[in-house]
Amino acid sequence: MSVVTTLSDTIVQQLSDLSFGEASSINDKLALLLEAEYRRRLTRYSLTNQQLAQKYRMSFEDFERQRITEQRGYTWEVESDAMAWETAVDGLRTVQRQLSDLRG
Amino acid sequence: MVSAPCSDNSATCAVRAMKLTIRGLILEAQDTLDRFWFVRDVNIVEQTPATVTVHLTIGADLFVQAFLSESSQRLSFALVGQSGRLYGRDREYGTWHRHPFGQPQQHELTPEGMSMQPLTQFMAEVEQILVEHDLL
C-alpha cells in the first residue's frame, strides 16, 4: 500500500544528493535511513541488556521475578537499573519487530 | 514487609491499583508547566511502546524524573540533584514506597499510595521541599 506525503524541497534535494549504494529512489533511501536508525537503537538496547544481565548475573525476567529492587533496599542504583533494563527489553522487542516489518 | 492486598472497593484500594497510561503521564507532565512555577521545561527522554521516561527541568542540576511502565505498572518519581536522588516515590510490584528528603537512601512503605494524579501530587511535594530547603 502506498500513501501520498509531502516533503520539503530541501529534504528531497538532500535525499537525492545522498549516495546510498544501490538505493536510488527516495523511498529506498528512506527505508535505508530507517533501518540504520533501528539498528542504532538495537545496538544501544542490546548493550544495556547485556551490561545489566552481566551486572546482576540474570535475565530481566529473573530480576523481576526475584524482586531484586526490593531485595537491595530500593536503592537509587538498582531502581535506575530496573527502569533502564525494562526500557531496553521493551525497546529490543519493538525494534526487532520494526526491522522485520521494514524488510517485509 | 508487604502491605495487605486490596480486596475491597475502598478509595485506598482504587488508588493503589490505579493503572496509568503513557499518554496520561505525558499529559500530566505537560500540565506541570502551567501548574508549577519552578518547572522550566518538560522533555520525553526515552519512550518505547510500554515505557516512558520524562524529565521536568527545574534548574541546571536539578530535575524531576518520572518513569512509567504500562506492562509492569512500575511508576517512579524522583527529584534528582548532583548527588543523585534527593526525594522519591515509587510503585513497584504493586506496592508504594517513599524515599524521604534528607535520607533518600532509606525507604518507607506508603500503603496509602498516591492520588489519581500522582505526578501532580509529587510536584506539589517537591515545591514544598524546594521552598523549605531553599534549593532554587
Image (cartoon, rainbow, N blue to C red):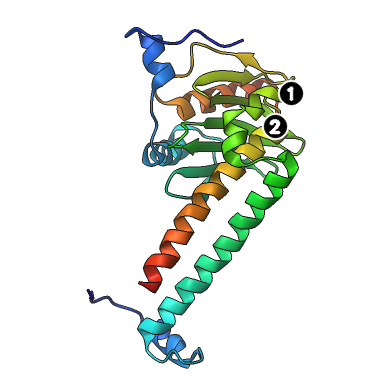
Residue A20: image location, x then y, percent: 50, 88
For residue B130, say whether it is visible: no
For residue A21, say whether it is visible: yes
Q: Chain of mark 1?
A: B
Amino acid type, callout 1: Gln
Number of numbered labels in the structure image: 2
Rendered residue at 32%/9% (across/down): B9
Q: Are marks 2 and 1 in contact (CB under 8 Å)?
A: yes
Q: Chain of mark 2?
A: A
Secondary structure beneath label 1 = loop
Q: CA distance from mark 2 to mark 1?
A: 7 Å
Please tell me the numbered disc located at residue B17.
Answer: none
Residue A77: image location, x then y, percent: 72, 35
Rendered residue at 66%/29% (across/down): A68
Please tell me the numbered disc located at residue A76.
Answer: 2
The quadrant in which the C terminus of chain B is found is: top right
- The answer to whether B103 appears left or right of A20 in the picture is right
Residue B135: image location, x then y, percent: 70, 30
Secondary structure beneath label 2 = helix
- The answer to whether A83 appears left or right of B47 in the picture is right
Q: Residue furthest right?
A: B83
Q: Are marks 2 and 1 on the same chain?
A: no
- Residue that numbered label 1 is attached to: B105
Amino acid type, callout 2: Trp
- The answer to whether B17 appears left or right of B64 in the picture is left
